[in-house]
Image (cartoon, helix red, strand yellow):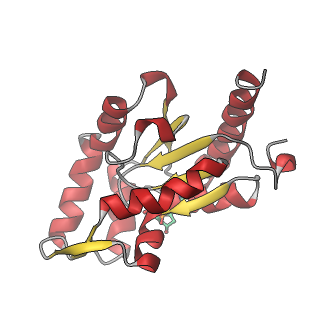
């Protein structure tokens, strides 16, 4: 039913968080193609607009220019109907999101995925620790009201299917709760 509302766009704005490799992109793209929601990958957005402010040698990646990312996203937010994909998002305004999904994967599963990506040893270790200590889940709880933060398992293909169905239900419920 969410899909049938497109292209009007449901006003709901949600965000996917989670350690790199946990499956945000996979879920986000699949969900977008099966609903009226627009998938926005912050990493891609930054790359396309070169929204960077220096380079992190230790992690071997560019540093996001957070102010410019926020400016760029602000326009898209006003339309609603978006799923934003970013591993962390403490620089995002709290008001942006109605629902926060934190994807989780088992360490062994995540390790294999990141190894396949060719992460160096430090990056591998840091990301696995990030998952073990559920850093992004804790951060999400610190940044948003607990009742809008949902954890989703993301280990196997069946999880992907379940997650899509769950999210579509949550969004429909959100629409019901917010239409008066
Ligand atoms: P992220 O965007 O969080 O960095 P991704 O979507 O690129 O992660 O996924 C990383 C890898 O894991 C990719 O090869 C696809 C695979 N994957 C994602 N979700 C999965 C799932 N539910 N079951 C099996 N493999 C999955």
| Residue 39 horizontal/vertical position (percent) | 61, 59
Residue 172 location, quadrant: top right
Vertical side of 153 occupied by 43: above or below: below
Position in image of residue 178 (x %, y %): 71, 25
Quarter of the image where the N terminus is located: top right
Judge from the rendering whether residue 133 lies leftward or rightward of residue 50; answer left or right: left
x, y percent for residue 81: 67, 48
Q: Is residue 162 something that shows in the picture?
A: yes
Residue 143, quarter of the rendered image: top left
The answer to whether residue 28 is above or below residue 1 is below
Q: Residue at x 75, y 49 (%)?
A: 9
Of 55 and 31, nearer the camera is 55
How many numbered callouts?
Answer: 0
Give the position of the C terminus as an image quadrant.
Answer: top right
Instruction: Tell me what residue is drawn at x 55 percent, y 34 percent.
Output: 98
Q: Is residue 156 visible?
A: no
């Amino acid at each position: 039913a969410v899909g049938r509302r497109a292209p009007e766009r449901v006003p709901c704005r949600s965000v996917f968080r989670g350690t790199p490799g946990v499956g945000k992109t996979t879920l986000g793209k699949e969900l977008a193609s099966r609903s009226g929601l627009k998938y926005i990958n912050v990493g891609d957005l930054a790359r396309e607009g070169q929204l960077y402010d220096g380079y992190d040698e230790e992690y071997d990646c560019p540093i996001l220019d957070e102010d410019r990312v926020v400016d760029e996203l602000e326009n898209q937010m006003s339309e609603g109907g978006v799923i934003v994909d970013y591993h962390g998002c403490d620089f995002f305004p709290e008001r942006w999101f109605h629902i926060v999904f934190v994807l989780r994967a088992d360490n062994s599963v995540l390790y294999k995925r990141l190894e396949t990506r060719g992460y160096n040893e430090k990056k591998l270790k840091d990301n696995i620790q990030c998952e073990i200590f559920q850093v992004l889940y804790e951060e999400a709880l610190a940044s948003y009201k607990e009742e809008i933060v949902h954890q989703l398992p993301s280990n196997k293909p069946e999880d992907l299917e379940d997650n899509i169905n769950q999210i579509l239900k949550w969004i429909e419920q959100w629409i019901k709760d917010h239409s008066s």
